[in-house]
Amino acid sequence: MSAIHVISESLAQIHLLPAQDIPNPGPKVPPGAQAIQDVVGYIIWIAGICVLGLFFGGIVASTAGRMWDHHGSGRTGARMIVSSLALAVLFGLGYTLVTQFAAGAS
């Protein structure tokens, strides 16, 4: 082999350097990810039902406390209503806050 032949073959093979042609695979869902998403979805659904239950329970407690002149129950019911509304706001903002924090970290 002549030196010219070796150089021309080296130049022809230069695109095969490892740092240049490493494939970039697309994202792939790991096995079991759907099961984890299902569990998280169930937990979110249960949390929403609990917030609704707290709200309506507060209405019942507040109404019963006012009807039978039991001020402790009336105040507790009012606190339950206000806390359920605060939880509903946090529940609505939760996904947005988590995704913003996760995007800022990467």
Image (spheres, rainbow, N blue to C red):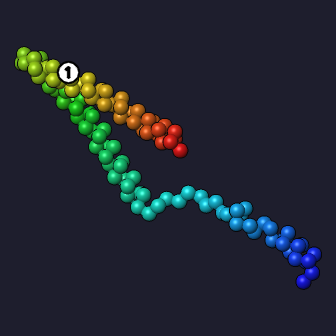
Question: Does residue 30 appear in this view?
Answer: yes
Q: Quadrant of residue 93?
A: top left
Instruction: Name the residue tied to disc 1.
Output: 78
In the image, residue 86 sits, relative to residue 67, either above or below, namely below
Q: How many marks?
A: 1
Q: Position of residue 55 (x, y in %)?
A: 24, 29
Image quadrant assignment for residue 90: top left
Residue at the front extreme?
3
Q: What percent of the width, then of the height, locates residue 4?
A: 93, 75
**Residue at (41, 57) in percent of width and height:** 34
Q: Reply above or below: 19 against 54.
A: below
Label 1 residue SS: helix
Q: Is residue 65 above or below residue 94?
A: above
Q: Is residue 31 left or right of residue 70?
A: right
Residue at the (49%, 37%) spot, across then down = 100
Q: State the quadrant of the N terminus.
A: bottom right
Decide: few, some or many residues near mark 1? Use Cα within 10 Å; few <14, some 14-19, many ≥20.
many
Occupied quadrant, residue 87 = top left
- Where residue 42 sits: x, y (%)? 32, 48
> Compared to 70, does 11 lie above or below?
below
Q: Quick check: can you spot residue 64?
A: no
Q: Residue at x 67, y 63 (%)?
A: 22
- Whole-percent x, y for residue 72 in the image: 10, 20
Query: Is 104 left or right of 37, judged from the image as shown?
Result: right
Left or right of 13, for residue 41 = left
Residue type highlighted by circle 1: Ala
**Residue at figure coordinates x 81%, y 71% from the top left:** 13
